[in-house]
Amino acid sequence: MIIDFHTHMFPDKIAKRTIDYLSGICKTKPYTDGTYEGLKKETLESEVDLSIALPIATKPSQFESVNIFASRYQEKPVLSFGSIHPDCENYKAKLRQIKEMGLKGIKLHPDYQEVYFNDIRYKRIISYAFELDLIISVHAGADPKCPDDIHCTPKMSAEVIQETGAGKLVLAHMGGNEQWDEVEEYLAGSDVYFDTGVVLGRMKEEQFLRIVRSHGADKILFATDSPWGGQKEFLEIINKMPLTDMERKKILGGNACKLLKL
């Protein structure tokens, strides 16, 4: 089973302007139109079995709309997580609401939520989400929105892991986009997952393989960050890498199946 653990889609009414806006920031041509149908089409054509959609509540007032939208997509080929903003009031009640809606996890984006990852607000959310057995996916490392002000560095992540304990935490972009030396220094081997979102083809293969081996292939999740990475293209890169068959099987879907309890 092949699972893309990091994709994005938006409600039809805002998809075009959202994609246009983000394309301008990322300076990247998208692989889909940003809609559910666009992501579904890419997933089916790429022979990916399941795409995990990761919405972002960029302000507290978006909590209801983001999670109601997410709750509509809970089966193949697209399963959506929810999201919560660190400034949301009654965060425990809101996390319970996410759980009760049947969502398997949440997405946090410190850059777009404009809060540093080692802030107490995130630590509280993560600790309680762990209690609820929710998966937490976090944008880690540099982001084109604010490349000189990184809101989730590997050192911040190491602090959060130390204070919140073990749980289902996924640090996107191999633990810290464009900060992979620091990932090796602070995070390799720790109790956290990394996803491959948007880094394949950009990260040096030698370093990617080194992190896979030092961190453990059982804690790496295949991901594209679609529409900013192509599923066919990323699968081709993974399949050409000198991974063992077991490593490849774990990365492409085995680890995700265990995490999602599929």
Image: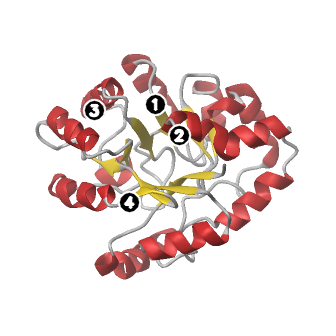
Which sits earlier in the primary sequence, circle 2 or circle 3? 3
Number of residue marks? 4
Label annotation for residue 168: 1
Q: Quick check: can you spot residue 94? A: yes
Q: Nearer the viewer, residue 30 or 54?
A: 54
For label 3, the residue is: 125
Q: Give the Cα separation between the discs numbered 3 and 1.
A: 13 Å
The residue most toward the left is: 89
**Kind of residue at disc 4:** Tyr
Tell me the element at label 3: helix
Q: Amino acid at mark 1?
A: Lys
Element on which disc 2 rests: loop
Residue that appears at 18% across and 40% down: 94
| Badge 4 element | loop
Q: Which mark is residue 73?
A: 4
Say which quarter of the image contains residue 253.
Answer: top right
- Marks 3/4: CA–CA distance: 23 Å
**Residue 90: x, y in percent?**
11, 36
Residue at 35% x, 31% y is: 118
* Residue 111 position in % (x across, y down): 37, 51
Sequence-earlier tag: 4 or 1: 4
Q: Which residue is at 30% across, 55% downward?
A: 71
Position of residue 255 measured from the top left corner of the image (x, y, whole percent): 62, 36
Q: Name the mark nearer the viewer: 4 or 1.
A: 4
Residue linked to disc 2: 262
